[in-house]
Amino acid sequence: MFGLTQTRKLTGATLHRRPLYVIGSVSVEFLVVAGGGGGGFGGGDSRAGGGGGAGGFRTGTLSVYSGVATTVTVGAFGAAGAAQQRGSSGGNSVFSTFTSAGGGGGGGQTAGQRAGGSGGSGGGSWDATNASGNTPSTSPSQGNNGGTGGGDPAGANEGGGGGGAYAVGANFVGGVSAGAGGAGNAASAALGGVTYAGGGGGSTYSATQGLGGSGGGGNGGKAQASLYATAGATNKGGGGGGGGGFNGSDVPANGGSGVVILAIPSTATVTFSGGVTQTSTTIGANKVYIITVAGVSDTVTIL
């Protein structure tokens, strides 16, 4: 911040002097990924749950005022569903005025819980519902819909896959497969080029389990083969795998926490508030900050 002096005169007399401040700005490339939704719990009797939806994925470039504290928040993971319940949604991630919405939880067996939750990407469903992604709506889209689940000829059930940042979650194929999680999206090369926000796979009793989408999505379970659901990857915003809960063994998994990544010119001085956990690396002319923990009151200040 640079202080200048402004002097006003009238008929040769000085009226007053006051400081005039000029605030500079810094161009910041950013990626904001929210927490992924938890997998749905299908319950017993060979009933399989849907995979969690990936956290919202938003990226762009923003001019940030020099010396002004800017909000930064990393969304928490969504918890796996309790007995026969839908999984919880992931937490929102924020940088300045940009918010990515947490992924929706995967659907469970209980009536009223069967549809996947809406969110950055939608959770996979226990039934024939496509849970909505890109909720609330952003442009470009922050995510995709979840896939549908349903029954197979043997009377069991396959869950739908959670949506990912790049692709929708896959629908079940009765007696053949649960839905796979939708693929995630890659950050730009300037932000490290890593893929984030894959959807969680749906679960099954005896068909092919739904695999998690690229970018940290967890796999759905397969009860008959004791293949347990896996969690979304930490700080990638992946959805958790769905679970059936058959004989108490095949349970769903949590989603993955989110992340905020900032590419800032190496010549700038960057400070964070006390609740922030971050690491940094140099890519080209920028220093890239990977923020893995930040609460709702945390900030970054750039000079």
Image (tube, rainbow, N blue to C red):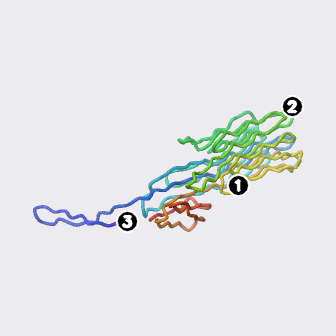
x then y, percent, for residue 214: 70, 48
Circle 1 sits in a helix, a strand or a loop, which is it? Answer: loop
Task: Please tell me which of labels 2 and 3 falls first in the chain.
Answer: 3
Name the residue located 37 percent from the left edge and 61 percent from the top edge.
Answer: 23
**Quarter of the figure that contains the N terminus:** bottom left
Name the residue located 81 percent from the left edge and 43 percent from the top edge.
Answer: 209
**Residue topped by disc 1:** 233
The Cα atoms of the two marked residues, 2 and 3, are separated by 70 Å
Tell me which amino acid carries mark 2.
Answer: Pro
240 or 185: which is nearer to us?
185
Circle 2 sits in a helix, a strand or a loop, which is it? Answer: loop
- Which labelled disc corresponds to residue 153? 2
**Residue topped by disc 3:** 1
Asked if disc 2 and disc 1 are in contact, CB closer than 8 Å, the reply is: no
Tell me which amino acid carries mark 3.
Answer: Met
Tell me which amino acid carries mark 1.
Answer: Ala
The Cα atoms of the two marked residues, 1 and 3, are separated by 40 Å
Q: Residues within 10 Å of mark 1 (few under 14, many from 20)?
A: many
x then y, percent, for residue 249: 86, 50
Q: Residues within 10 Å of mark 2 (few under 14, many from 20)?
A: few
Asked if disc 2 and disc 3 are in contact, CB closer than 8 Å, the reply is: no
